[in-house]
Image (cartoon, helix red, strand yellow):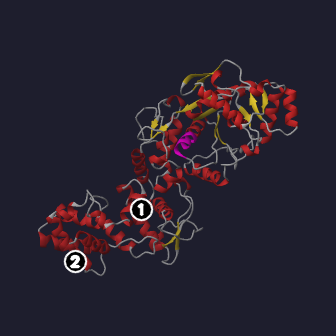
Amino acid sequence: MSKIRVRFAPSPTGQLHVGNARTALFNWLFARHHGGAFVLRIEDTDVERSEARFETQLLEDLRWLGLEWDEGPDKPGAFRPYRQSERLELYRKYSTELIDAGHAYFCFCTPEELEADRQAALAAGRQPRYSGRCRKRLREEAARKVAEGVPAAIRLKILEGEFSWRDLVHGSTSFSSDVIGDPILVRSDGHPAYNYAVVIDDHLMEITHVIRGDDHISNTPRQLATYNALGWQPPEFAHLSTILGPDRTRLSKRHGATSLENFREMGILPEALRNYLALLGWSASDGVTEILSNQALIEQFSLDRITKSPAVFDQEKLNWLNRHYMAQLPPEKLAALTTLSLVNAGIIIQPIGSGVRVEDPGRSPSNELVTVARLSDSGVLGQPAVDKPTFEWIDRLGSLTPPYGDRWEQLFSLVFNYDAAAIVTAEETRHVVEDTGARAVLQAFIPKVLAEKELTYERFRALAKEVQKETGKKGKELFHPIRVAVTGAVSGPELEKLIPIFEEGAKLPLQRHVKSTAERLREFAAAAKL
């Protein structure tokens, strides 16, 4: 058997979403498992919608996810070029061969004629397909019209019969030629149709396996017809099941985050997303294990463990995996990623540094910028540089995330989004206002905090002990109402860790203000009418 070669061929018309990312991952895993080649090809013949910025983001997203390709636009191999827009001469060459061999013909039908045929078929209860009007035109006449400059598409002649193949996921699959019609190979503007260009590219690039979404199953017969007309052996096909949202409809933006950029902004680690995407329609060899390293995924991946049924996207399971991988991060990487998340959230706006990583920021002079190095294996793209006090605060903040949250945005919400009015009315927290004992604790505690000029956690505890003596409340009866009033939540990181973050953060030049403990309690007292 020849060397395994697979390809991921996105169109640069928008952001990379989880469906295409899973397709890329499965191709990459298959190639790595078999020691084959993973090819990145850009299908950019949709001139109106394709944009260079989307191609740039596609490449960045794939690298962030950890999927490096062996050949592609920036890694030219023996089968270059890897952008379809740079391969137009190849498509013209083979379309000419098909016409000369009598397997294809020029079509002069106008859009209006084609639409009229379509409406007539629908009215008669038939599936729309090309009528074959231009198929009967003499080749000499067609050639003359083309020479005169009359716009013409090129269509493939479909022979009667069935198109069958053994799909590596769905098994034996077949389509009757009756439902296909003569597909367009090249549009009248000279650009190739998808089902034609993909055949030329896959054959010339020696692709052995085509692994793609099952929305392409209906395209396969048209592609097989082109392979047959050219006398080429088609690759093997594997069509992946659809990814559904929790309501079991096709995953879309209405379900929340769907693009890799969305997940990056949320604070999802590439390791977690890669692990989770692998579990969407595939399972480990023991059918049970869910936390799988990159190497384990490569070693265990096989197409025969891909399921036919649709996979349901579960954000909570992704969050669970993210917390696991966050807990595995070395402290310097956790600090780097926390910094980048704050920059992405617009909380820190600082110049981008270009220095080297400071292994121990504590040894740096107080006026030195602490530069977070590029850590591509942990998803850091960029080098935000911040002053030393800010970096040390970020380091402290980031260390709280794995034990108490599965995404940075959760901790950021706790630190930056204090809303006293919401706390006193929310179902989960309003009891501290309604309960007489809780009110007594807060009425005694809040004035003491507001009287402090400099609040440390030690003073915070000392004031709480004074309130304990005054009210007779202790344990949960004492600290629960204080926690809710200070943080707005009934659980979370220890107050011993949060109080310094609030106090130090309030002094930093951040784009969004961190409210100090006193500011929070003053607002709470006003909202609760204490």
Expressed as whole percent of the image width and height from the top left, the position of residue 82 reads 71, 44
The numbered mark at residue 398 is 1
Q: What residue lies at 70% left-to-right and 44% top-to-bottom?
A: 45
Expressed as whole percent of the image width and height from the top left, the position of residue 432 reads 21, 63
Residue of label 2: 448
Expressed as whole percent of the image width and height from the top left, the position of residue 127 reads 60, 26
The numbered mark at residue 59 is none
Q: Residue furthest top?
A: 161
Q: Earlier in the sequence, mark 1 or mark 2?
A: 1
Label 1 or label 2, whichever lies nearer to me, is: 2
Q: CA distance from mark 1 to mark 2?
A: 30 Å
Looking at the rendering, the stretch of residues picked out in magenta corresponds to 17-25
Amino acid at pointer 2: Lys
466 to the left or right of 346: left
Q: What residue lies at 57% left-to-right and 68% top-to-bottom?
A: 352
138 to the left or right of 316: right
Local SS, label 2: helix
Amino acid at pointer 1: Gly
Depth order, front residue of 27/20: 20
In the image, residue 54 sits, relative to residue 445, either above or below, namely above
